[in-house]
């Protein structure tokens, strides 16, 4: 995959997944994002790095948070942004993906932000798109969600500093979660001490240990002395068959409550990629407590996506070269 993601100089051409990327590149993205945090705090929330560039949001799945933060990120870099309405596009009338790409390329765009329900769709597009266009994966099927992972890594570093000493627990629907997969790849690449995945056997992928994780089916055992807790949403839209008896029973065994949180490290932070389901995977008292950094994740997502866009289009390295 990296032969597609990276150009001959080893810089990002597309951002399709975390798997296989080097630690140094992930750190570069985090450092670049840190330089963009101040943009959102200015009276005029603009940086000129992508002025004259055209970015198209291609969301084949519904999304509010991800699409909105990508749009804000692009506009804060001074790009022109088009939100392409897939439900009314020619693809809903039978046009194939290649023909759609060719027509959009004819509009002289520079980047596609792609969310698709089929795993591998952004990779397919990256293989067939015109050479001057970059693709960013905004979530593909059950495969990866790389920018979510990077904003999660930024939030963890913001609160915890070094990655090496940390124990991190990812809790919930691991089986259907592209966020879990991207986070596991990012955490292991950044060298955390321990990555735990916690959930019922029916929602745990076979062979997940091969990715460098420890598997727990008991919530308190999985949370004991961890520094970071990443809760996941139950992705019922991807479930086939009766994988769970009920949401109420799931909350009893795997919902994050004040009682369950007591076994974690006293300074542990609580994260969630959203949207949260209160009373299903997390209690309201935890979602709103001081240890919750869920809203900070959303804010950080803008700077991280600015960083990925700027690096993918080469404007960060170009700017450094002119200094």
Image (spheres, helix red, strand yellow):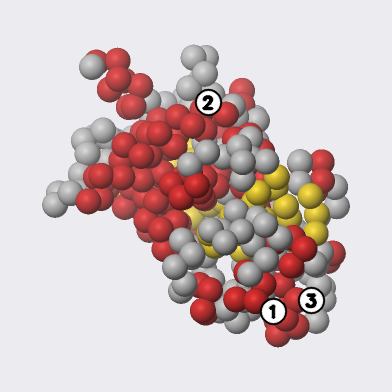
Q: Are marks 3 and 1 in contact (CB under 8 Å)?
A: no
User: Which residue is tagged 2?
Assistant: 24
Q: Quadrant of residue 220?
A: bottom right
Q: Which mark is residue 251?
A: 1
Query: At x 24% / y 15%, what residue is drawn?
Result: 322
Does 63 appear above or below 162? below
What is the quadrant of the C terminus in the image? top left
Residue 235 lies, with reference to residue 27, above or below; the image says: below
Label 1 SS: helix
Q: Which of the pair 21/60 is nearer the observer? A: 21
Q: Quadrant of residue 283?
A: bottom right
User: In terms of depth relative to the viewer, which is nearer, 36 or 168?
Assistant: 168
Name the side, left or right, on which 193 lies relative to 82.
right
**Residue drawn at (79%, 76%), measured in percent from left and top?**
244
Instruction: Give the x, y percent position of residue 265.
Output: 61, 59
- The residue to which callout 3 is attached is 244
Q: Quadrant of the N terminus?
A: top right
Labels 2, 3: front one? 2
In-image side of 267 versus 20 (left or right) = left
Asked if 321 appears above or below 243 in the picture, the reply is above
Q: Position of residue 242 (x, y in %)?
A: 82, 76
Cα separation, mark 3 vs mark 1, equals 11 Å
Question: Could you tell me which residue is drawn at 64 percent across and 51 percent down?
Answer: 168
Mark 2 or 3, nearer chain start: 2
């Amino acid at each position: 995959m990296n032969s597609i993601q990276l150009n001959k100089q080893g810089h990002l051409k597309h951002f399709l997944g975390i798997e296989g990327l080097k630690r140094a590149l992930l750190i570069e993205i985090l450092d670049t994002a840190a330089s963009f945090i101040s943009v959102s705090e200015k009276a005029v929330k603009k940086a000129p790095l992508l002025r004259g560039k055209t970015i198209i949001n291609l969301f084949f799945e519904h999304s509010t948070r991800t699409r909105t933060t990508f749009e804000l990120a692009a506009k804060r870099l001074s790009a022109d942004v088009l939100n392409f309405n897939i439900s009314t596009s020619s693809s809903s009338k039978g046009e194939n993906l290649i023909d759609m790409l060719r027509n959009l390329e004819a509009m002289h765009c520079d980047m596609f932000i792609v969310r698709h329900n089929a795993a591998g769709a952004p990779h397919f597009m990256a293989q067939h798109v015109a050479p001057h266009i970059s693709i960013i994966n905004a979530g593909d099927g059950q495969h990866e969600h790389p920018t979510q992972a990077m904003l999660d890594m930024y939030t963890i570093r913001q609160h915890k500093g070094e990655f090496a000493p940390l124990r991190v627990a990812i809790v919930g629907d691991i089986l259907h979660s592209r966020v879990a997969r991207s986070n596991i790849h990012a955490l292991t690449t950044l060298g955390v001490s321990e990555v735990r995945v916690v959930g019922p056997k029916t929602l745990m992928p076979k062979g997940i240990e091969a990715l460098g994780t420890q598997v727990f089916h008991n919530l308190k055992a999985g949370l004991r002395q961890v520094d970071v807790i990443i809760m996941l949403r139950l992705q019922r839209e991807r479930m086939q068959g009766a994988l769970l008896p009920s949401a109420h029973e799931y909350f009893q065994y795997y919902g994050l409550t004040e009682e369950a949180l007591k076994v974690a490290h006293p300074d542990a932070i609580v994260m969630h990629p959203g949207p949260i389901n209160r009373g299903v995977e997390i209690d309201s008292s935890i979602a709103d407590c001081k240890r919750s950094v869920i809203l900070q994740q959303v804010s950080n997502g803008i700077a991280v996506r600015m960083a990925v866009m700027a690096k993918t289009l080469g404007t960060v390295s170009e700017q450094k070269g002119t200094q």
